[in-house]
Image (cartoon, helix red, strand yellow):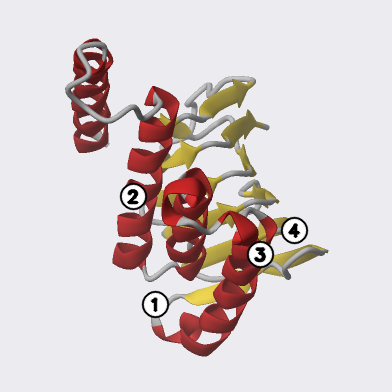
Amino acid sequence: MKSSKVFWGIFFILAAVYVVISKFGILPDIGVFSIILTVFFLWLFVEGIRNVNFWEILFSIAFICIIYDEPLGITALTPWTVLGAAFLGSIGLSLIFGGKKRKWKTVTGNVGTSSSEQYTGEEIRCENSFGSAIRYINSDNFRRAAIENNFGLLSVYFDNAIVQEGSANVSVENNFGETNLYIPKEWKIQNNLDRSFGAIRETGSSIGTSSTVLYLNGSANFGEIHLHYI
């Protein structure tokens, strides 16, 4: 996550320079907020390609089209046509290629609906897009989980997960939504979560009386990751 902080730090410095130089009429008149959003969606697009996430790829393109619809001459297509195309395209590509990108067994939330699932296993992947989902991790030997939430509400409970090897890893990617993690307060927490125009919140506190260590990695992008210690 340090590289992400360096990236955004450099970006905001360059944005400050742009604000000053633009007053001299040297550079084209583009709003600072539009530049910030453009950089974010380009970063999200690259992350989508890296993670083979079609939701991130297509919605990044859609939002860039919305930001620059006038220069591109596509105002007739924005915003709902391009968003609808990104939505349907993401569903279609995920159905065709989604099962090929990872070896982990996946529990996926239905688009636009509410669902609840219980899951057992050592390596777990939970996905939710445009819906509400609850996941209960009931594992006798939990090692790692990859959690991804796009434009939805996802809650994951770890209170019935047993860590046999002393530590476990959870990777969280929250994009334009809210992800709630319910974690035993007895676990020791190594919180490496980052945020880009999002928030990381905690309710309660980790007392760390157990020998189990949970490593949290990932980021909240225009959304919120909420840690509940139970």
Q: Nearer the viewer, mark 1 or mark 2?
A: 2
Q: Residue at x 53, y 71 (%)?
A: 121
Q: Amino acid at mark 3?
A: Thr
Q: On the image, numbered disc 3 is attached to which residue?
A: 81
Query: Eyeballing the image, is 9 above or below 70?
Result: above
Percent from the top left, x then y, of residue 16? Answer: 25, 14
Q: Nearer the viewer, mark 4 or mark 3?
A: 3
Earlier residue among tags 3 and 1: 3
Mark number for residue 213?
A: none
Q: Nearer the viewer, mark 3 or mark 1?
A: 3
Task: Tell me if mark 4 has few (under 14), some (14-19) or many (20+) residues whose alpha carbon lies within 10 angstroms of its own.
Answer: some
Q: Amino acid at mark 1?
A: Arg
Task: Tell me if mark 2 has few (under 14), some (14-19) or many (20+) residues whose alpha carbon lies within 10 angstroms of its own.
Answer: some
Q: On the image, numbered disc 4 is attached to which residue?
A: 131
Q: Residue at x 51, y 30 (%)?
A: 198
Earlier residue among tags 2 and 3: 2
Q: Nearer the viewer, mark 2 or mark 4?
A: 2
Percent from the top left, x then y, of residue 216? Answer: 41, 41
Q: On the image, numbered disc 2 is attached to which residue?
A: 42
Query: Eyeballing the image, is 206 above or below 92?
Result: above
Q: On the image, numbered disc 1 is attached to which residue?
A: 102
